[in-house]
Image: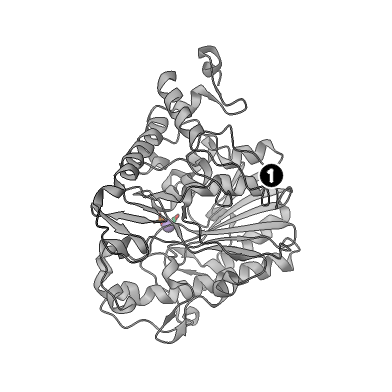
Amino acid sequence: DGSELTEVTNYVRSNQAEPSAEMFGKAEGRNLIVVTLESLQTFTLNNEMNGQTITPFMNELTEDEDTIYFPNFYHQTGLGKTSDSEFLLETGLYPLSGGAVFFTHSGNEFNSMAEKMGNEGYSTNVQHANTKSFWNRDMMYESMGIDKFYDIQSYTVGEGQAVNWGMKDIPFFEQSVDHMTEMEQPFYSRLLSLTNHHPFTLDEEDKLIDEYDSNSGTLNRYFQTVRYLDEAVKSLFEDLKEQGLYEDSIIVMYGDHYGISDNHNAAMEQYLGKEITPYESAQLQKVPLFVHIPGYGEGHVNEEVGGQVDMRSTILHLMGMETDKDMQFGGDLFSEEHEEFVIFRDGRFVTDEYVYAANVCYENGTGEPVEDQTLCDPYAERAIQELQYSESIINGDLLRFYDDQSGQLKTIEESEQP
Ligand code: GP9
Ligand code: MN
């Protein structure tokens, strides 16, 4: 009911960050292209595997004048994997602990980023070469007010263009950009890549580097599929330029979740050359975030500690849209007031000072347990609280009672309107 929502609203308002004056509206009026980089973890970037560069194109992007790269950015997904990352992005709420919110609450009312951009005159869509019902996307996208879903039926998978879970990323991106040329502008188009997905298999011709040599075939192959994904991103940028869509767009790319689970820690220890403590395991939940604005010219590495829940307000502010009346938990990564406090879906958390994992409070940077373990307590309490607030919004479908135009609770009569 309303009273619960009042408490959550107060919490959300008191933790809100003012947009950065410098970055607000930087990409106003442009097409927004958001790319989900399947299973891409940050440890592969600016790194080598047996002397071979894993992500040459994205490495360049980390130093590119039109790109802001976030190396201290974490995924916050749970069992819903890719779909949880989509949920974080669109709603600024946390996914659920129990199961994929795309399945359990697809009938809810959401104030999604897509809906918001739709209200500002954007046409909105998602492009993904898989069956539309996977993760219940077709239902959820409707609830999120996404205008169109280009699923597998919108693609022509030619000979040699499928591997692993389906269509390869390079032809997928190429045909997705073709779709963009037909879209009403400005558009918000979200692309979900797929080739870099467990079990990380490739055709011979797409293996651009060797396998690794650990006892984990999964990790060994992962480097190769990450290398392929990097090549696909490079070709996406070329496709956009060829079709004349590049200059008028902003391209945001993020890793959705880990590709290598703790089951492969022995192999990962061999690769990283260090023991994987709970602290290191939390560090491995870093996924890359790129904000690429053609013509920006002031690209840099932004060390801010952040998470996927921050993407919604970061992006909306870049597009020149306010979020101060929205019911969401993230904050603008460019804001002076952004708090460096990332809550993982399983209750672990990271701040600029601490990493809390396996009930130990570690010092961020050294990975040593801090002497005074109670220093993490206030954050641990807030982490539980914030996850609970988010769950109560979802479980109670509370956004039915919330008017995102005014930021006020709705009266009973208003909330009964469809
Ligand atoms: C499937 C793709 C991958 O459509 O999103 O799903 P995942 O297993 O990573 O959630
Ligand atoms: Mn995924």
The residue lying at 42 percent from left, 49 percent from top is 341
Q: Looking at this view, is 85 or 108 the one in front?
A: 85
The residue lying at 35 percent from left, 81 percent from top is 212
Q: Dot 1 lies on which element?
A: loop
Q: Looking at this view, is 274 or 131 the one in front?
A: 274
Image coordinates for residue 380, horizontal then vertical, percent: 31, 44
- Which residue of the protein is positioned furthest toward the bottom in this rendering? 51
> What residue did someone put label 1 on?
320
Relative to 81, 274 lies left or right: left
For the C terminus, the quadrant is top right
Image coordinates for residue 409, horizontal then vertical, percent: 52, 21
For the N terminus, the quadrant is top left
Ligand 2 resides in the quarter of the picture at: bottom left
Relative to 117, 45 lies left or right: left
Say if 89 sits above or below 305 in the image. above
- Which residue of the protein is positioned furthest toward the top in this rendering? 413
Q: Quick one: label 1, few (<14), some, or many (20+) residues within 10 Å?
A: some
